[in-house]
Amino acid sequence: MSNTGKLKAFADSIAAATSPFRNYLSDLHRKYLPLSDGTVADYIPELALADPSWFGVAVATVEGQVFEVGDCAQPFTIQSISKAFVYGLALEDHGRDYVNSKVGVEPTGEAFNAIVLDEATNRPYNPMVNAGAIATADLIKGKDGTERLKRMLDMFSRYTGRSHDIHVPVFLSERATGNRNRAIAYLMLNFGMVSDRIDETLDLYFQQCSILVTARDLSLMAATLANGGVNPVTGDRALDQRYVQDVVSVMLTCGMYDSSGDWAYRVGMPAKSGVGGGITAVSPGKLGIGTFSPPLDAKGNSLRGIRVCQQLSQDFGLHPFNVAPPPKDLDSWIKGDADLDRW
Ligand code: GLN
């Protein structure tokens, strides 16, 4: 970052610390912390170690202000949230037509790990279910697994402004227990939908799920999409502007597993969740939200994260189809103007 950039980030951090929006987020955090429903993912032992009381809420604006409340620096594995961003990299690597020929954009209404392909085309339905995500990982260019993983990690760094590692024990467990994903991959290989470097691609997929992120990172990743593909803090481009709409669209239709319809109805912001407890949600042109709380509902979505996003959407009118004046005006709350509440 340049010196002017650093100065701006410093000024933004002071403004964020004193903004009424920060107090609003603290209240939200306090309100939902006592929720004790849901269960922490336990399909591998490492995920079951997560503390159910971990709870972080981060919001990053397209102006580059970042608001953080709670456990926003606690690392956890990105899991399925990676799928949306890797889809963007595949689009950059091959263009829309080729990627569309390999992976559809239709919601399935089925669980994320369903063993199902489109009967007419043999394509996986969309890049957010495991089948589509494995087919998408297959498209990531590179001479070997190491180079392909490095390209993924570099991409995530452009979104978050910091470097990323994978959590090796989670990766090894995903690989050791991943026979269902292996079955999906070999079914696609049988239909010629993926290349024959399938074992390398499966490792790459298990590794991409094991990348460590924080709630702050997730807010910046969403804010980068909200900002047309440019990280609003560093100014680095993370995704070609041409593909931002594609990535955000599949997040809206398929990002929240088989409750994507319910989410679109109640929250509306394109989002992606992961079984590590993270959710990233995009309000195009405005902001990105990152939440982290490990207890999940039956569909695999973080319960506190759902509540937080729903409330933010209602209070600030962040549903893209909302035309009524929202109860709270986002700009006034962030800047600290008088008359914060409209009603
Ligand atoms: N690694 C997990 C899997 O492939 C990803 C699950 C998720 O976050 N839904 O099953």
Image: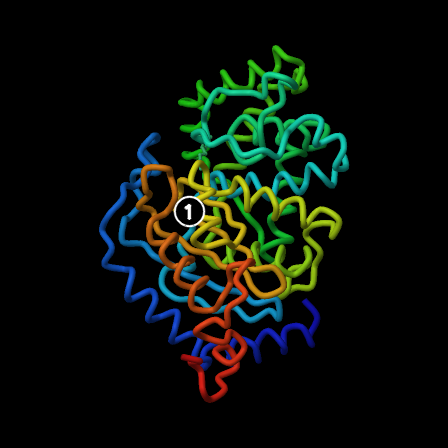
Q: How many labels does the image show?
A: 1
Residue 267, picture quadrant: bottom left
- In which quadrant will I find the N terminus? bottom right
Residue 263, x across and y down, in percent: 44, 48
Query: Front-most of 165 and 125?
Result: 125
- Report the residue at 35% width, 31% height from top: 44
Left or right of 79 in this view: 90: right
Element type at mark 1: strand
Q: Is residue 145 visible?
A: no
Residue farthest along the top direction in this orientation: 190
* Residue at x 28%, y 65% (from the top left corner): 31
Ligand 1 rendered quadrant: top left
Q: From what the image shows, is residue 54 above or below residue 63? A: above
In the visual, does 33 lie left or right of 138?
Answer: left
Residue 128 seen in the figure: yes
Q: Position of residue 29 (x, y in %)?
A: 33, 64
Q: Which amino acid does label 1 sit on?
A: Phe
Residue that badge 1 annotates: 76
Tell me where residue 60 appears, x and y as whole percent: 53, 65
The residue at 40%/28% (across/down) is 173
Q: Residue furthest bottom?
A: 338
Quadrant of the drawing holding the C terminus: bottom left
